[in-house]
Amino acid sequence: SGDQDLRGRHVVVSAGGTREPLDPVRYLGNRSSGKQGHALAAAAAARGARVTLVTTAPTEVSGVDIVPVETALQLRDAVREAVADDADAVVMAAAVADFRPETYAPTKIKKTHEARADGGEDDSAPTITLVRNPDILADLVSSRGSGTAPVIVGFAAETGDENGSVLDHGRAKLDRKGCDVLVVNEVGADKTFGADDNTVTVLRRGSDDVVEVGPATKAAVADAVWDVVTTLL
Ligand code: C5P
């Protein structure tokens, strides 16, 4: 929609995959490109919103305040701070790592024999212990209270399986997370990650209506998401 229906609103978008460091040169990451989140930020700005984009993927989007982050904990803090600044809506498009390494090695982890003074052979491998990251989306929901701003939007990358369709899994996730809107996209080896097109189903809490979009550009998907969000503002 070409109108300025987000004028006067502050919206927060998170984008990209978090990087969870192991040592100064290595991290655990994922394949999220951040493109859908960046398209959401650009679309909101075009519709007149003040936009804060918290992203792990370096980018410039004109008319958007960019907050660069790397880890899930940094992303949580940045999103919380932006939401506390009178946000009307928050869209969690970021692919947040569910786990992070328990410890960060301040110097590069070495193969064992390299670390030893004698430099002898050693085939042993280190064990990486993981700990849970907070669920940022669920925490936003529980700290908001009921019926007040901001509108909270989650994303879910799902695959259909013997336990249910992509939509079944999406409905269950919407209930579990308690957000207002869930944007479900079907993922597979060749789908979505890094692509310029996307196919999604937009679910609303308390409504059986679904909005199906695509295959469409990530810009068109972004506008469809804001179309739903504006009905809830
Ligand atoms: O449970 P799942 O990871 O599929 O949920 C995806 C949604 O939850 C996305 O909106 C993502 O940004 C958010 N999420 C989060 N914190 C996590 C994991 C996911 O906010 N630790």
Image (spheres, helix red, strand yellow):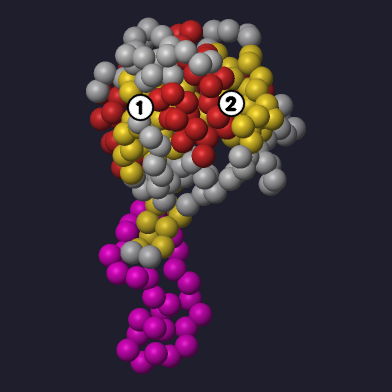
x, y percent for residue 140: 36, 24
Q: What residue is pinned by disc 1?
A: 51
Residue 220, numbered label: 2
x, y percent for residue 120: 43, 90
The answer to which of marks 2 and 1 sits earlier in the sequence is: 1
- Specify whether residue 110 is painted magenta: yes
Give, as a single range, the part of the protein colored magenta.
100-128
Distance CA(mark 2)–CA(mark 1)? 18 Å
User: Position of 63 compared to 172: left or right?
Assistant: left
Mark 1: which secondary structure? strand
Instruction: Let me know if residue 224 appears in the view.
Output: yes
x, y percent for residue 158: 63, 33
Q: How many numbered tags mark residues here?
A: 2
- Specify whether residue 107 is painted magenta: yes
**Does residue 97 sit above or below 167 in this rendering?**
below
- Residue at x 69%, y 30% (from the top left corner): 215
Instruction: Let me know if residue 142 appears in the view.
Output: no
User: Position of 164 compared to 196: left or right?
Assistant: right
